[in-house]
Image (cartoon, helix red, strand yellow):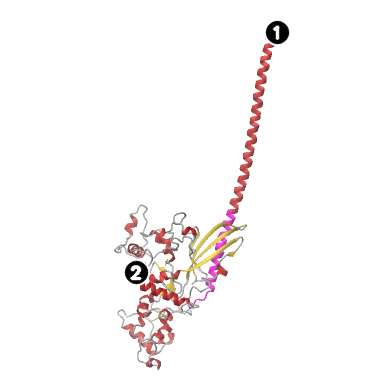
Amino acid sequence: MRKKVKKLGSEILAARTGTEGDKKGLVLVAVLWVVAVLMIIVATAGQTSRLDTKVCRLVRTEQLRCKWSCRAGIETAIGVLNEDFRESDSLTDLWSDNEEDLSNIKLEQCWFDVMVVDEASKLNVNTATKEQLLGLWYMTEEIAEAIIDWRDKDDNPQTGGVEGGYYENMPFRYTIRNGPFRTIRELLLVRGVTPKLLYGEDTNFNGQLDYNERDGDKSPPPDDEDDELDEGWIAHLTCYSYDTNKDASGNNRININQANERQLERSLNINRSHAKWIVENRNRQNNRRYGSIADLINNNSSKEPTRGSREGSDQAEPLDLQTFYQIADKITVDNSQKIPGKVNINTASEDVLTALLGGDEAAEELARNIIIYRAGLIDGMQSIAEVMQAGTMKIDTFKKVAGYITTRSDVFTVRCVATADRSGLSGATLQTEAIVDRSSTPCKILYWYQGANN
């Protein structure tokens, strides 16, 4: 009996031992599977990480190439501007019409395109009158007066404008400038000015109606789907333009408010009778000075010199139109080296010229005539008087705008877009914008932005 019990106990113990052994085996197999799966995950993660690192390195390299390609594009444009003849500036110059040097240029696995815009082709927001501002599309009296209040030095608001108190009581308050705009994007701080008004539909500034700029609200920017490009105010306004107070030869202009008869006669190569009249007529002005060079002429001015002036008479003879055309680019009423706010009639768009001339239908027709006339010129108008000499503008109109126009420019916006070339596919893209002043050597950078379009 004891033998049977002992035998049974041995069998039970053996059965238990076998079961525990099987469990340990299963656990070992499971652990091995877990280890194998983890090894696969680690290997996959490592491979993905290496791939991500390579992609990041590639993108970073492309961005770096685009950055220096943009810099190369800016420097190329500056070189073209420096080589440009300064007698006048028009849309036929190489800085404006030069696909060979500025379009689709290959550089170190990148392609770049450069666009140069004359800042003097726009209205200067620091000098434009209320009437001129109202000549722009979508401009209201309230916004125009708010712009004037922003730039003036006093705290007295225009009828529909606002001064510092308005901005200081906003949820995120800030201080009004009460001085000249320093960048054109500063307009966004003025009451009523929105990004849509400033940038319009052309947010990449290429001057073309791209697909995303005519698809409504499907993709930014929002647009009206009318298949017409709204460039926004940024295409028509500037705060950088000025006129260097020199003639086409680079000589300082003669101030007709200060020069005496002898200086006028010698410097302008005019008859003594005309020089004498300029001085005597100046003394008869209300404040004993000319407000504009156009004050030398009027509707009664003769077209050609009179007999007395041709013969060298000592008697004062009113200036005739022919003589005025000859000296218009050589004279000034201001001693400043730089006169801000001048609009280049050779490069200004029809919209800008219309606003400059008053914004009505007559101004629109006159602007169109100016553009038609200059389109037939090889080098543009050489003097502001030519716009009147050509018959496109009457004397009365010329007298109103003579102080606002020029035929030469020194400040330009240069935009460069660089795209990395990835085996025939487009890679990273970068845009750079610089505003350059070529009147000094080396060229002075007034504004620089690299990155997003706006």
Three-letter amino acid code at disc 1?
A: Lys
Above or below for 105 versus 89: above
Q: Are marks 1 and 2 in contact (CB under 8 Å)?
A: no
Residue 142 appears in view: yes
Residue with the most extreme bottom position: 311
- Amino acid under disc 2: Glu
Distance from Cα at disc 1 to Cα at disc 2: 125 Å
Q: Tell me, for residue 20, which label it has, or none.
A: none
Would you say residue 182 is visible in this rendering?
A: no
Residue nearest the observer in this picture, 344 or 280:
344
For the N terminus, give its image quadrant. top right
Describe the element under mark 2 as helix, strand or loop. helix
Q: Give the range drawn in magenta.
A: 59-87
Residue for badge 1: 3
Q: Does the magenta stretch include residue 288?
A: no
Q: Main secondary structure of the magenta part?
A: helix
Instruction: Please rate how many residues cluster around mark 1, counting C-alpha atoms within 10 Å: few if below 14, some from 14 to 19, many from 20.
Output: few
Question: Image check: 260 left or right of 36?
Answer: left
Residue 278 in picture, x, y percent from top left: 36, 85
Q: Is residue 61 left or right of residue 305?
A: right
Residue farthest front in this picture: 226
Mark 2 neighbour density, 10 Å: few (under 14) some (14–19) many (20 or more): some
Whether 68 is among the magenta residues is yes
Depth order, front residue of 265/183 = 183
Please tell me which residue lies in front, 374 or 431: 374
In x, y percent, where is residue 285?
A: 31, 81
Q: Mark 2 points at which residue?
A: 131
Vertical side of 199 occupied by 270: above or below: below
Q: In which quarter of the image is residue 66?
A: bottom right
Left or right of 212 on screen, residue 359: left
